[in-house]
Image: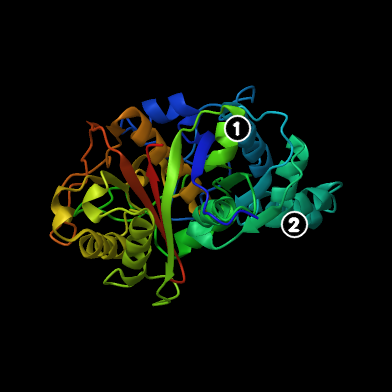
């Protein structure tokens, strides 16, 4: 086992959002500030108050028919394959697989529906394969990967925790190549839960940090990233995309679903990530915020950003890309890491779409509505989840 910490490099990624599959869909959707919200048609929304989510208008995966919603399995395998190909590791087998997911609840719903109607041949097997741990195994098996297989299920930080754990494995020499992924596809069960909690935006639009924000909307989001030890990348002549400079995890356990009003946990996670990266707050050139668009989350996150960045906060560019992708739950951390990586590599910062009016409780530079050119060297992506868990990851030019 290596005694000196290894630099952790990102060498490949694959991503799926409601804008489509791959990097170009991010550019023309997220980075153009184009919201992907539309009425949901993949299940009956008539029993609910809400009707909208960020779901694709056409086939989300290459080769799919427009009227088919992919399973999490299909989407994870497609993103993982794309990540390995970008990294130049297609056919390489000694790779750990870490996935953030609550499982594919569409299969559970289909199973019970079939049982009610006296059918369901093969449905039990599909349910088993849709469980969180099984999904990590399925991805590994489909791609011939023989390393560890782990699932992370802690809500909206699940895939950022997968990334952080993967970075720890690489940094400490316990692994040299790790595939970290996260997935959520809009389905009836969680749609119903958020609807019953009256969390959805009332007008089918998400306006994070804006004074007239009314809530969140869900969205499809799946991504996979390849993390490698720098020594291995050098040895094989690979091309790094970025370095994971630091990470932080914190729990404030303030409330079952509300964030701490002073942003205690989120500030602690961001401060730890910046310190681990050997950076000062003013070294961070952009923050991809959790930014759900709810009144309580956005004000608490604004306070956390002020606490973390101090005098650098007023000039710090921050945006919430959930304004275009929706809230991707367990997939958020992985997808937003890819978005942050794209911003770092291409020198363009994604906007907070739909921003209309300043809120005194959210008084930062939110990159309103239009992308911004900026050659940044370090970016931070932050996420939070029910139960008071918080994560932050610093990506930097390699």
Q: Is residue 171 above or below residue 238?
A: below
List the single residue furthest toward the bottom: 254
User: What label does residue 112 carry, if any?
Assistant: 2
Residue sitting at x 69%, y 49%: 136
Does 101 appear above or below 253?
Answer: above
Q: Position of residue 211 (x, y in %)?
A: 18, 55
Whether residue 297 is visible to the viewer of this picture, yes or no, is yes
Please say if 367 is above or below 390: above
| Numbered circle sitting on residue 235 | 1
Residue at 18%, 44% (x, y): give it.
356
Residue found farthest to the top:
63
The residue under the point 60% across, 38% down is 232
Which mark's residue is nearer the viewer, 2 or 1? 1
Q: Please name whichever residue, 276 or 38, is drawn nearer the observer in this view of the structure.
A: 276
Residue 246 x %, y %: 41, 53
Quadrant in which the C terminus appears: top left
Neighbourhood count class around disc 1 (C-alpha, 10 Å): few under 14, some 14–19, many 20 upward: few
Question: Can see residue 358?
Answer: no
How crowded pointer 2 is (Cα within 10 Å; few <14, some 14-19, many 20+) is rated as some
Task: Using the numbered discs, state the Cα–Cα distance from disc 2 to disc 1 in whole angstroms.
Answer: 51 Å
User: Is the N terminus in the top left, top right, bottom left or bottom right quadrant?
Assistant: bottom right
Horizontally, residue 21 falls left or right of residue 91, namely left
Element on which disc 2 rests: helix
Q: Nearer the viewer, residue 247 or 340?
A: 247
Measured as percent of width and height from the top left, residue 311 is found at: 13, 58
Is label 2 in contact with label 1 (beta carbons under 8 Å)? no
Q: Front-most of 19 and 373?
A: 373
Give the mark nearer the N terminus: 2 vs 1: 2
Using the image, tell me which numbered label, if any, was put on residue 40. Answer: none
């Amino acid at each position: 086992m290596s005694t000196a910490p290894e630099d952790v490099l990102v060498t490949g990624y694959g991503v799926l959002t409601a804008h489509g599959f791959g990097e170009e869909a991010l550019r023309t959707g997220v980075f153009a500030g184009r919201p992907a919200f539309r009425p949901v048609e993949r299940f009956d929304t008539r029993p609910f108050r809400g009707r909208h989510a960020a779901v694709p208008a056409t086939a989300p995966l290459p080769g799919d028919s427009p009227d088919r919603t992919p399973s999490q399995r299909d989407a994870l395998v497609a993103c993982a394959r794309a990540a390995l190909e970008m990294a130049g590791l297609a056919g390489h087998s000694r790779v750990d697989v870490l996935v953030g997911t609550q499982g594919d609840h569409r299969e559970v719903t289909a199973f019970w529906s079939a049982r009610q109607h006296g059918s369901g041949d093969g449905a039990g097997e599909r349910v088993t394969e849709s469980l969180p741990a099984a999904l990590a195994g399925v991805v590994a098996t489909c791609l011939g990967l023989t390393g560890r297989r782990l699932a992370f299920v802690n809500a909206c930080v699940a895939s950022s925790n997968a990334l952080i754990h993967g970075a720890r494995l690489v940094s400490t020499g316990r692994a040299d190549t790790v595939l970290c992924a996260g997935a959520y596809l809009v389905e009836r069960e969680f749609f119903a839960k958020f609807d019953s909690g009256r969390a959805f935006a009332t007008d089918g639009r998400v306006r994070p940090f804006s004074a007239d924000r009314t809530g969140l909307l869900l969205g499809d989001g799946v991504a996979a990233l390849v993390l490698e030890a720098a020594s291995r990348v050098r040895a094989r002549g690979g091309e790094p995309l970025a370095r994971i400079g630091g990470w932080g995890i914190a729990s404030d356990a303030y409330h079952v679903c509300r964030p701490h009003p002073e942003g205690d946990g989120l500030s602690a996670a961001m401060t730890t990530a910046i310190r681990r990266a050997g950076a000062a707050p003013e070294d961070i050139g952009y923050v991809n915020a959790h930014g759900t668009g709810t009144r309580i989350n956005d004000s608490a996150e604004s306070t956390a950003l002020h606490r973390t960045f101090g005098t650098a906060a007023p000039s710090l560019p921050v945006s919430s890309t959930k304004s275009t992708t929706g809230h991707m739950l367990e997939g958020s951390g992985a997808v937003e890491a890819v978005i942050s990586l794209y911003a770092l590599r291409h020198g363009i910062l994604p906007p907070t779409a739909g921003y209309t009016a300043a809120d005194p409780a959210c008084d930062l530079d939110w990159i309103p509505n239009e992308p911004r050119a900026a050659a940044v060297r370090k970016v931070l992506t932050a996420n939070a989840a029910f139960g008071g868990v918080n994560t932050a990851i610093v990506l930097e030019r390699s």
